[in-house]
Image (spheres, rainbow, N blue to C red):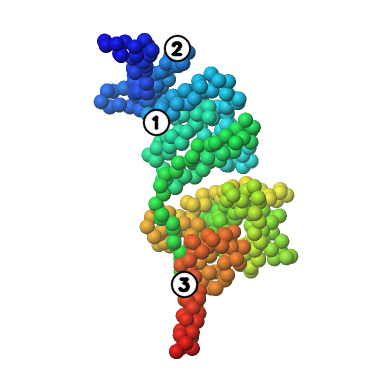
Amino acid sequence: MNDTERVKSNLYPCRKQEKSMAVKKFYSNKEKPGWRWDAAKKQFWSWGFDIRLGNGARRRESGFATRQIAEQAVAQIRVSEKEGKYDLQTRKFPFVADVLEKRLERIESKKERVRAGTIFSRWLTILPKRLRFNELAPAHIQLYIDERMREIKASSINREVTCLGSAIHSAHVNFPELVGFPTPKIPRPKVEQSRRERLITQDEVMKVLTHLLSAKREDESNIDFRRRIVVGQVFQMALLTGARVGEIIALRWSQIDFDACILQIIGTKTRFKSAKVVRYLEITPSIEAILRDRETFRSDNPKRRGTVCEFVFSKTGNSVTKYHQILRDAAKATGITYGADIRGGFITHDARHTAVTRMLQAGIDLSTVGAITGHTDANLILHYSHATRESRKKATSVLENFVTDSQKKAG
């Protein structure tokens, strides 16, 4: 050892030891949450770190899904050490698990709360235990995305990631110490632009509704008959109003005014729930016939007579029993392709797309269509521009005439 090396050795006695203490792979014969199987070594493994703290203490932890997450954890530890050394730690950060728990408590809808709980639980099983909010990084969210990509589509993952992002960005509501604290960027999987453009034809509408709303069949029980009728009425309402299926199923009797011929539709999209956006639609003869039938069924049904049922098409306002199965059976019986994953197949939401397209093709202005469906003008222009081709032709012809007339006058 020369003099220079001897001096470095005296100045940095732990350097050689720290080289062996770093981010690396850990192996185990037992399966643990977040660990993966190495077929070659026939062991479970995960990323982790084995480091020496500034005070000389050794810290070792495994269970990280990627090297990047482990490195970020080490970086956070080093920053915390520096903050503690100079008394810069002015706030104690909550655990991510506590942030998610508080977010669940703030969700009003039982259905959304159950869904969010499932997503949060799945994420927590992947995350390092006792991860604090200030240690949260984009890689932790990417870890969830990578796990889910094996099971569901990117578009579905995006909706789940939105749920996680909502909890992260609103954490300051329950934890004031997080006010102004920068949140990590939310990564998202790339989604192929495969927006549905399926229109339901008049022939298909006639076939499906005829099958669904036909009289009771000999081999059909009373309950199956009523379920089929309800599905037909909900599908027909979707075509008549352009409303989402969830909005129709959640329709209450209190939202109907037969005297004024007005029907209220309350938006069910996430962005509408806090604002309670309400749209007002005219009750047409076809819509009134459906509502009157539901009213008659409510008064004639022995099980519901004398009871108060606030919803028009369901008991709880959340779903209609066997809706998709009954609609699928009707499509199959009439020779119509059904299903979002089947080429050329239709789904109920296509009724909304069809309603918007027909109104635009009829020359109804964007503001009026948006008032009925709840779309913004920008969304209508972006997604339904194909429906206004005649209007575009008329507009370009005006410009054409303006230019040619100017040229004639100039000549």
**Label 1 secondary element:** helix
The residue that label 1 is drawn on is: 68
Q: Nearer the viewer, residue 166 or 42?
A: 166
The mark that comes first in sequence, 3 or 2, is: 2
- The disc placed on residue 56 is 2
The mark that comes first in sequence, 1 or 2, is: 2
**Label 3 secondary element:** helix
Indicate the amino acid at tag 3.
Answer: Arg
Looking at the image, residue 332 sits to the left or right of residue 272; the answer is left
- Viewer-nearest of labels 1 and 3? 1
Indicate the amino acid at tag 1.
Answer: Gln
Q: Position of residue 46 (x, y in %)?
A: 37, 25
Q: Nearer the viewer, residue 374 or 134?
A: 134
Label 3 and label 2: CA atoms lie apart by 73 Å
The mark that comes first in sequence, 1 or 3, is: 1
Looking at the image, residue 286 sits to the left or right of residue 42; the answer is right
- Viewer-nearest of labels 1 and 2? 2
**Label 2 secondary element:** loop
The residue that label 3 is drawn on is: 389
- Whether residue 147 can be seen here: yes
Relative vertical location of residue 160 with respect to residue 277 in this rendering, above or below: above
What residue do we see at 52% from left, 52% from top? 323
Indicate the amino acid at tag 2.
Answer: Gly
